[in-house]
C-alpha cells in the first residue's frame, strides 16, 4: 500500500506532454497541445527547427514527409510554404479542418492563454547547422513572452537537447534557463557524473536506458541532478520512474499517466 510519503512523491512528479497529447492527436499541432492542457498536463514538450526564413516551428523530423501532406526539409522551406501543408490529416483523416504548421510563437501564445501554469520543455533539433541562430531565436521568443527566468529555480521553461553545443550556447546566453542533456545510450561523461555534457543541471535519459540501467538514475540523483525521462507510455515504466524518484515523466499519454498518479 502507498504510504502518505509515497503519495506526496507521486504528486510531485511532473507530467509533460510529449509533442502534445500526441497519442490522441497529430503531434506538434495546436489540437495536440490544447488537449494536453485540457487534460491537466503540467507541461508541454516541443521540438523546434528553423525554417528557411528564420522562424522556429514545432516539427520533429528533418523533413515534413511523415507528419504532413507536403514534402521537403523544414530548413529549405519558408514559413509561408510550410503553412500550405496540413499537419493533421496523416493522423486524423476525418479532421474537419487542416492543421497548419505550429510556430513556437503560437505555442507560447497557447501557454500564455492557458489560465494556469503550464511549463515548457523545448528541444532544439539539429542546432549545430545554424551557428547559434536556433538558440538566439528561441531566447528572443522566450524573452518576448516574459519566459526568461531570473533564476533556475521556479523557471517555467527549460531547454533540452542531445547537442552539447546547443546547451552550452543557451547556458552562455541565458544562464538562468535550466537545460536538460538528452541521451539514449551510455552517458558520454568525460569527467565526473556531477558535470553533465553542456553543463546541464538536468539529465534526460530515454526510458530504454532507464529500464536497462536503473542504477544510472540513482547515481545521477546522488550526484545532485534532477532526472527527466522520455518517452514513458507504459504503466510499468511509470512505476519504475516513480520508484527511481525522477522529477518529470515525458509521455505521449498525459491523461493516462496523470490517472496512474491519482491526479
Ligand atoms: O523529450 C525528449 C525526447 O523527445 C527526445 O526524443 O526523438 O522524441 O525528440 P525525440
Ligand atoms: Ca523531442
Image (cartoon, rainbow, N blue to C red):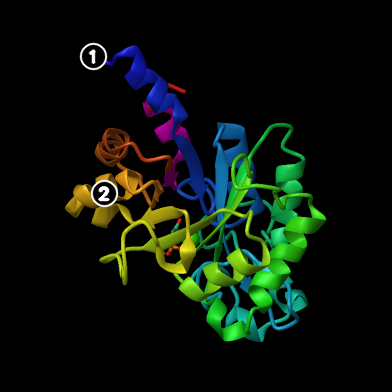
- Image coordinates of residue 52 in percent, x first then y, are 70, 83
- Image coordinates of residue 58 in percent, x first then y, are 62, 64
Position of 195 with respect to 210 (left or right) is: right
- Based on the picture, tell me whether residue 259 belongs to the magenta stretch: yes
Q: Is residue 124 above or below residue 120?
A: below
Residue drawn 41% across the image and 67% down it:
197
Q: Quadrant of residue 182?
A: bottom left
Compute the Cα span from label 2 to label 1.
27 Å
SS assignment at label 1 = loop
Per the rendered image, the range of residues in magenta is 249-260
Q: Choose the circle earlier in sequence order: 2 or 1.
A: 1
Rendered-image quadrant of the N terminus: top left
Query: Circle 1 sits on which residue?
Result: 1
Q: Quadrant of residue 93?
A: bottom right
Position of 163 with respect to 100 (left or right) is: left
- Based on the picture, tell me whether residue 162 belongs to the magenta stretch: no
Q: Is residue 216 above or below residue 170?
A: above
Residue 116 versus residue 154: which sits nearer the camera?
154
Position of 19 with respect to 81 (left or right) is: left
Q: Residues within 10 Å of mark 2 (few under 14, many from 20)?
A: few
Residue 73 versus residue 165: which sits nearer the camera?
165
Query: Circle 2 sits on which residue?
Result: 219
Residue drawn 57% across the image and 47% down it:
44
Please give the label number shown on residue 110. none
Residue drawn 50% across the image and 72% down it:
61
Amino acid at each position: 500500500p502507498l504510504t502518505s510519503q509515497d503519495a506526496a512523491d507521486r504528486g510531485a512528479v511532473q507530467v509533460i506532454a510529449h509533442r502534445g497529447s500526441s497519442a490522441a492527436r497529430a503531434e506538434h499541432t495546436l489540437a495536440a497541445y490544447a488537449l494536453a492542457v485540457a487534460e491537466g498536463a503540467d507541461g508541454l514538450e516541443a521540438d523546434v527547427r528553423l525554417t528557411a526564413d528564420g522562424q522556429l516551428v514545432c516539427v520533429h523530423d528533418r523533413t515534413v514527409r511523415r507528419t504532413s501532406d507536403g514534402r521537403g526539409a523544414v530548413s529549405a522551406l519558408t514559413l509561408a510554404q510550410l503553412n500550405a501543408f496540413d499537419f493533421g490529416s496523416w493522423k486524423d483523416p476525418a479532421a474537419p479542418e487542416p492543421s497548419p504548421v505550429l510556430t513556437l510563437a503560437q505555442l507560447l501564445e497557447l501557454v500564455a492563454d492557458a489560465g494556469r501554469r503550464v511549463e515548457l520543455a523545448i528541444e532544439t533539433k539539429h542546432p549545430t547547422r545554424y551557428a547559434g541562430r536556433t538558440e538566439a531565436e528561441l531566447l528572443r521568443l522566450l524573452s518576448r513572452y516574459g519566459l526568461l527566468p531570473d533564476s533556475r529555480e521556479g523557471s517555467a521553461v527549460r531547454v533540452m537537447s542531445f547537442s552539447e553545443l546547443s546547451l552550452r550556447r543557451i547556458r552562455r546566453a541565458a544562464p538562468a534557463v535550466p537545460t536538460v542533456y538528452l541521451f539514449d545510450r551510455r552517458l558520454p561523461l568525460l569527467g565526473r557524473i556531477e558535470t553533465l555534457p553542456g553543463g546541464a543541471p538536468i539529465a534526460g535519459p530515454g526510458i530504454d536506458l532507464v529500464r536497462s540501467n536503473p542504477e544510472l538514475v540513482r547515481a545521477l540523483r546522488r550526484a545532485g541532478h534532477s532526472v527527466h525521462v522520455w518517452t514513458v507510455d507504459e504503466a510499468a515504466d511509470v512505476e519504475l520512474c516513480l520508484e527511481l524518484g525522477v522529477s518529470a515523466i515525458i509521455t505521449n499519454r498525459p491523461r493516462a499517466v496523470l490517472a496512474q498518479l491519482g491526479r
